[in-house]
């Protein structure tokens, strides 16, 4: 039986690999423990399987910034802005646009 939060989240993702919320939790746990590569693997999986899940773009972009991958962060934020416009989430769009503007 899994004992750590990370192990629990991994087992949950194994059961439901396309569930965006569970995978997002795993990505954030990786990020919080300092495993930025692991976090990006999960954020990218969300973007691929659940392309309208806007938090993956915002936190994915932030994670890429922490990794020093500024150009890739820009691309993720730009895609996130497109997604949030499409789904009508003005608050998330303005957050991502603000993050993107900070990079320019």
Image (cartoon, rainbow, N blue to C red):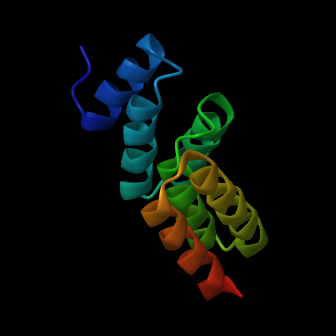
Quarter in which the N terminus is drawn: top left
Q: Residue at x 58, y 36 (%)?
A: 46
Classify 55 as above or below 20.
below
Q: Please state which of residues 36 and 28 is positioned toward the viewer in this rendering.
A: 28
Q: Residue farthest to the front?
A: 88
Q: Residue at x 53, y 21 (%)?
A: 18
Q: Residue at x 57, y 54 (%)?
A: 84
Q: Position of residue 39 (x, y in %)?
A: 52, 48
Q: Quadrant of residue 11?
A: top left
Q: Please state which of residues 97 and 67 is positioned toward the viewer in this rendering.
A: 97
Q: Please state which of residues 80 and 68 is positioned toward the viewer in this rendering.
A: 80
Classify 3 as above or below 68.
above
Q: Position of residue 41 (x, y in %)?
A: 61, 41
Classify 9 as above or below 17.
below
Q: Position of residue 79 (x, y in %)?
A: 71, 56
Q: Position of residue 68 (x, y in %)?
A: 67, 74
Q: Residue at x 36, y 56 (%)?
A: 32
Q: Quadrant of residue 49?
A: top right
Quarter in which the C terminus is drawn: bottom right
| Total tally of numbered discs in the picture | 0
């Amino acid at each position: 039986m899994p004992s750590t939060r990370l192990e629990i989240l991994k087992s949950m993702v194994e059961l439901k690999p396309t569930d965006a919320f569970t995978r997002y939790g795993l990505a954030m746990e990786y990020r919080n423990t300092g495993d930025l590569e692991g976090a990006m693997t999960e954020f990218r999986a969300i973007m691929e399987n659940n392309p309208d899940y806007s938090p993956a773009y915002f936190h994915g972009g932030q994670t890429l910034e922490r990794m020093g991958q500024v150009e890739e962060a820009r691309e993720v934020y730009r895609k996130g802005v497109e997604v949030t416009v499409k789904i009508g989430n003005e608050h998330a769009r303005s957050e991502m646009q603000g993050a993107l503007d900070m990079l320019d």
